[in-house]
Structure formats: C-alpha cells, structure tokens
Image (spheres, rainbow, N blue to C red):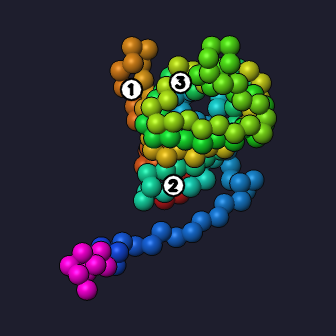
C-alpha cells in the first residue's frame, strides 16, 4: 500500500456517512420566508440540507405579485416551476427568462437577479448548490444565505433541531 492509499483510507474512515432522507412534502407546514429577502408573503418548506455539498433544497409558495430581493447565486442552482409563472432576471422582456408551469431552469454560479417576480400565484422547487448573496441596490453584500442559515431559520421556525 502506498502512502497515498493509506492516507486516503484514513480520511475516508474519519468521515461520517450522511444519512439518506425522505420528506412527505404535504405533511410539512409552510413557513414565512423572511421579509428581509422577499416581498409579498412568500412561504417556504426546507426539504433537505447537504453540508457535505454545501447545498440546500426547498419548495417555495409565491403569491401573485410577490418577489425575491436582489441576489447573486454564489453557487449554481436548479429549479422546477410546478405552478404559475416566474420572471427571472427581469423576464424575457428584459433579457432574462420567463418560466412557465412545469418549466426547468438552471442558474449558473454568479447569476445575478435584480428581482425574481411572480405575476401570478406560483410554486417552485429549487436546489441551491451554494449560498445566495443578497445585495443592496449598490451591489454591496447585505446577507449570505447558505445551507447553515437555511437550516437555522427552519429550525427556529419549526422548533426542530
């Protein structure tokens, strides 16, 4: 056995295996998504956090006229719009995308959104592979929301730990 193989085995043995997970979405209560990062009463359900990947997955319920504040995807993300309509990066009229029900989207690392807007009642599922950085109008950082912050908020809202 080479030194490299030995070290690799030692590293692997030290890491705990992450448990598999299953969530019955309709059995989880909606929680308010913070008004500090959204407008119009958006609600969410945290489905999973993955510390080993720095990822988190949630489903969002967005009333007509609601929106997420300006943010940057520090890591990429994938979404599935399951209901309604979502104007991403200003929608198609402003060079972005207008997602329609059962539409899939990929947001690359560094994607910037001045506003993500829901002109009709909408829901979407999203996995964030890294944090979101919410920004002020001048582009300066306001807050970073990654898996730890998402899990901490969810735990405080639901009383779980």
- Please report whichever mark, 2 or 3, sits nearer to the chain's N-terminal start: 2
- Please report whichever mark, 1 or 2, sits nearer to the chain's N-terminal start: 2
Q: Is residue 77 visible?
A: yes
- Contact (Cβ within 8 Å) of mark 3 with mark 1: no
Q: Locate residue 24 relative to residue 145 in the image: left or right.
A: right
Quarter holding the N terminus? Answer: bottom left
Give residue 35's position: percent from left, percent from top: 55, 28
**The one of 72 and 33 positioned closer to us in this rendering:** 72
Give me the residue at 61% from left, 53% from top. Answer: 47
Give me the residue at 57% from left, 46% from top. Answer: 127
Q: Locate residue 63 relative to residue 77 in the image: left or right.
A: right
**With respect to residue 103, does 142 lie above or below?**
above
Comparing marks 3 and 1, which lies closer to the viewer? Answer: 3
Mark 1 and mark 2: Cα distance apart in space: 22 Å
- Residue beneath label 1, please? 142
- Residue beneath label 2, please? 49
**With respect to residue 106, does 119 lie above or below?**
above
Q: Secondary structure at mark 1?
A: strand
Q: Is 61 inside the magenta-drawn segment?
A: no
* Magenta region, residue range: 1-10
- Contact (Cβ within 8 Å) of mark 1 with mark 2: no
Q: Secondary structure at mark 3?
A: strand
- Residue beneath label 3, please? 113
**With respect to residue 71, does 29 lie above or below?**
below
- Please report whichever mark, 3 or 1, sits nearer to the chain's N-terminal start: 3
Give residue 136's position: percent from left, percent from top: 41, 19
Give me the residue at 68% from left, 18% from top. Answer: 92
- Contact (Cβ within 8 Å) of mark 2 with mark 3: no
């Amino acid at each position: 056995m080479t030194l490299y193989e030995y070290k690799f085995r030692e590293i692997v043995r030290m890491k705990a295996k992450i448990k598999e997970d299953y969530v019955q979405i309709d059995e989880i209560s909606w929680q308010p998504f913070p008004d500090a990062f959204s407008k119009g009463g958006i609600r969410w359900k945290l489905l999973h956090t993955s510390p080993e990947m720095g990822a988190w997955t949630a489903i969002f319920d967005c009333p007509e006229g609601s929106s997420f504040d300006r943010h940057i995807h520090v890591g990429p993300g994938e979404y599935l719009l399951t209901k309604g309509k979502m104007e991403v990066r200003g929608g198609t009229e402003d060079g972005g995308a207008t997602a329609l029900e059962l539409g899939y989207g990929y947001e690359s690392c560094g994607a910037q959104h001045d506003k993500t807007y829901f002109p009709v009642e909408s829901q979407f599922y999203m996995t964030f592979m890294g944090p979101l950085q919410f920004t002020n109008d001048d582009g300066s950082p306001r807050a970073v929301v990654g898996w730890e912050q998402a899990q901490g908020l969810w735990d405080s809202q639901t009383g779980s730990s």
